[in-house]
Image (cartoon, helix red, strand yellow):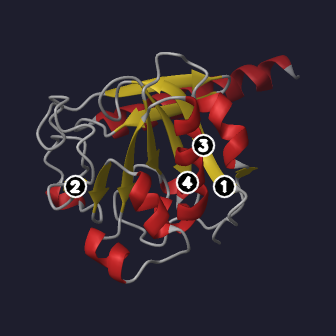
């Protein structure tokens, strides 16, 4: 399911993190991915199903609500399947603030240019400053950098972030754990072992919550 130009099918958003690129950023994770990479950290966002449908213009105030945010990061899911909407989102955000844009994709850059998988890919590439391309391969996950595995490549499509001093390829990884009500969100490319620990902690909290409800509803 490819979202129409006027709307994005969004799995989640977060405003203000330092775990997905230089500076303080807001993140959009889109719903739906065709690749099904083994060991994907976001399996719930793979199915091509309806999540939160939202117009790009309506996302801008949400993502830029923190005045310290200086960039957007697009992930998922597969952003290129919703390229037209994300391109419009980046364009509108830049009418408000001079932000940078980082985008993850399972497609190779060469294929995006020669065989775009959805409408708007060329427009999105024009808005993106740094593209991280290639499928995630669990056996090549070396625990370093903003890319998930060493086969993935970092492309500076503009010079906006080249002088920032941020090592996309080899820097130590960091991640944020955000709790919103009963939902928990792991933000970033996680260091080795963090996903398993995060999943165990979430399962433990859910089990205690269920037990508490059972005891108080009797």
Looking at the image, is mark 4 or mark 2 earlier in the sequence? 4
The residue positioned farthest toward the bottom in the image shown: 115
**Distance between the alpha carbons at the discs numbered 2 and 1:** 25 Å
Q: Nearer the viewer, residue 168 or 148?
A: 168
Label 4 neighbour load within 10 Å: few <14, some 14-19, many 20+ = many
The residue positioned farthest toward the front in the image shown: 95
Q: Which mark is residue 86?
A: 4
Residue depicted at 53% across the width and 34% down the height: 203
Q: Nearer the viewer, residue 162 or 34?
A: 162
**Distance between the alpha carbons at the discs numbered 4 and 2:** 18 Å
Res. 78 visible in picture: no
Instruction: Give the quarter of the figure containing the N terminus.
Output: bottom right
**Distance between the alpha carbons at the discs numbered 4 and 3:** 10 Å
Instruction: Indicate left or right for 137 with 112 as reference.
Output: left
Q: Secondary structure at mark 2?
A: strand
Q: Which residue is mark 3?
A: 92
Looking at the image, is mark 1 or mark 3 earlier in the sequence? 1
Q: Which mark is residue 8?
A: 1
Instruction: Give the quarter of the figure containing the C terminus.
Output: top right
Q: Which residue is mark 2?
A: 155
Q: Are marks 3 and 2 in contact (CB under 8 Å)?
A: no
**Distance between the alpha carbons at the discs numbered 1 and 4:** 8 Å
């Amino acid at each position: 399911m490819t979202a129409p130009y006027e709307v994005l099918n969004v799995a989640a958003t977060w405003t203000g993190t330092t775990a997905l690129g230089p500076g303080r950023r807001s993140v959009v994770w889109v719903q739906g991915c065709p690749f099904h990479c083994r060991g994907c950290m976001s399996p719930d966002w793979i199915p091509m199903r309806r999540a939160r449908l939202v117009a790009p213009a309506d996302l801008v105030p949400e993502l830029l609500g923190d005045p310290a945010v200086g960039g957007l990061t697009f992930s998922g899911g597969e952003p290129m399947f919703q390229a037209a909407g994300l391109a419009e989102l980046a364009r509108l955000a830049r009418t408000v603030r001079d932000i940078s844009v980082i985008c993850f994709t399972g497609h190779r850059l060469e294929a995006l240019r020669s065989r775009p998988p959805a409408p708007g890919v060329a427009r999105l590439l024009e808005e993106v400053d740094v593209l991280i391309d290639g499928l995630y391969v669990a056996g090549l996950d070396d625990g370093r950098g903003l890319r998930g595995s060493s086969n993935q490549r970092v492309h500076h499509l503009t010079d906006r972030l080249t002088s920032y001093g941020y090592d996309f390829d080899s820097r130590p990884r960091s991640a944020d754990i955000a709790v919103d009500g009963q939902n928990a969100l792991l933000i970033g490319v996680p260091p080795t072992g963090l996903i398993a620990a995060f999943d165990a902690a979430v399962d433990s909290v859910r089990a205690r919550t269920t037990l508490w409800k059972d005891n108080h509803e009797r």
